[in-house]
Amino acid sequence: MKPESKNLDDYLVVDTIVDWKTPDVQQAALNLTRSIPDEVDKAQCLYEWVRDAIPHTNDAGLEIVTCREVNAQFSVDKEQLAFPMEAAAGEFIYDTIFAAPVSNVVNKLKKYESRRELWLDLPKAFENTT
């Protein structure tokens, strides 16, 4: 996988989708990582907390639109998605690590209020137009 940007700050931009600067989020991150000295280990801890502690649509049996990974694993070396890619179904993995949420994916998530509606109109591919 290739980073979209070599500048780490590009991955830390706060917007309406990803807002890690809210006091509650910052306090939770500090509480979770206070005793962890290594930056990569901190990132892994936070990744796994988000993956495991936040209820998301499909796994929680909810109709509201969110997302959750089931067997996703943190790795700085390789992609480890929740489910294996199904090439026969036209699925593929982008080779890019995007710095920001991809606009047409975000637009789909904002457009629908239920998982059923979203499932019928998932993007087949995307361009990052933000």
Image: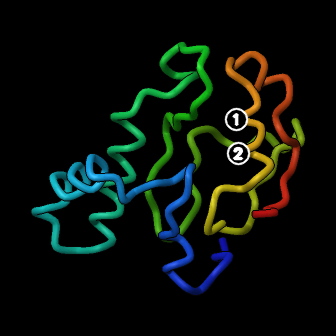
Write down the residue under mark 2.
Answer: 106
Residue in front for this viewpoint, 85 or 62: 62
**Residue 124 occupies which quadrant of the picture?**
top right
In the displayed structure, 107 sits above or below 80; it is above
The structure residue drawn at horizontal position 39% and vertical position 52%, both measured from the top left corner, is 47
Residue in front for this viewpoint, 128 or 87: 128
x, y (%) of residue 128?
79, 62
Graded by Cα atoms within 10 Å as few (under 14), some (14 to 19) or many (20 or more), the crowding at tag 1 reads: few
Write down the residue under mark 1.
Answer: 110
- Tag 2's secondary structure? helix
Tell me: 60 left or right of 47.
right
Q: Quadrant of the C terminus?
A: bottom right
Disc 1 and disc 2 in contact, CB within 8 angstroms = yes
**Amino acid marked by disc 2:** Val
- Tag 1's secondary structure? helix
In the displayed structure, 119 sits above or below 28; it is above
x, y (%) of residue 6?
59, 86
Graded by Cα atoms within 10 Å as few (under 14), some (14 to 19) or many (20 or more), the crowding at tag 2 reads: few
C-alpha separation, residue under disc 1 versus residue under disc 2: 6 Å
Tell me: 44 left or right of 113.
left
The structure residue drawn at horizontal position 50% and vertical position 28%, both measured from the top left corner, is 56
Tell me: 43 left or right of 120.
left
The structure residue drawn at horizontal position 52% and vertical position 22%, both measured from the top left corner, is 59
x, y (%) of residue 5?
64, 81
